[in-house]
Image (cartoon, helix red, strand yellow):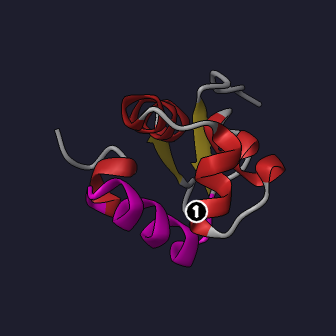
Amino acid sequence: MIREPTHFLRLSDNKGGIIVKGLGHRIRALRNEKGISRIEFAEAIGITYSAASKYESNARMPGIKTLIKMADYFDVSADFLLGREK
């Protein structure tokens, strides 16, 4: 089995999956740009500090509702968060 770098997150689609690069890095950069702490971010979008930490470290992928809340909060598209826009 080939292991992927830890900064990639694999989503299963039953055909080998897709790779989302850098979601956590984008979240962290946007949060830092806004000048807010991780706990402030978590509370603002209604998630736990632990979940926010896991999203930023690419240990966990947010569900679609949470992803939309993040995009709305940062005023970016979900595609941008997922690395689908340049």
Outermost residue on the right side: it is 50
Residue 8 seen in render: yes
Q: Amino acid at mark 1?
A: Ala
Q: Residue at horizontal 46%, vertical 60%?
A: 70
What kind of element bears circle 1?
Answer: helix
Assess whether residue 30 is covered by the magenta stretch: no
User: In the picture provided, is 59 more to the left or to the right than 7?
Assistant: right
Residue 14 seen in render: no
User: In the picture provided, is 12 more to the left or to the right than 25?
Assistant: right
Q: Residue at horizontal 73%, vertical 40%?
A: 53
Res. 8 image quadrant? top right
Q: Which residues are magenta?
A: 62-77
Q: Position of residue 83 (x, y in %)?
A: 33, 43
Q: Residue at horizontal 59%, vertical 50%?
A: 41
Q: In front: 84, or 45?
A: 45
Q: Residue at horizontal 63%, vertical 49%?
A: 40
Q: Which quadrant of the rendered structure holds the N terminus?
A: top right
Q: In front: 43, or 10?
A: 43
Q: Position of residue 3 (x, y in %)?
A: 71, 26
Question: In the image, is residue 83 above or below residue 48?
Answer: above
Res. 35 image quadrant? top left
Assess whether residue 71 is covered by the magenta stretch: yes
User: In the picture provided, is 70 more to the left or to the right than 79?
Assistant: right
Residue at which label 1 appears: 44
Q: Position of residue 31 (x, y in %)?
A: 47, 38
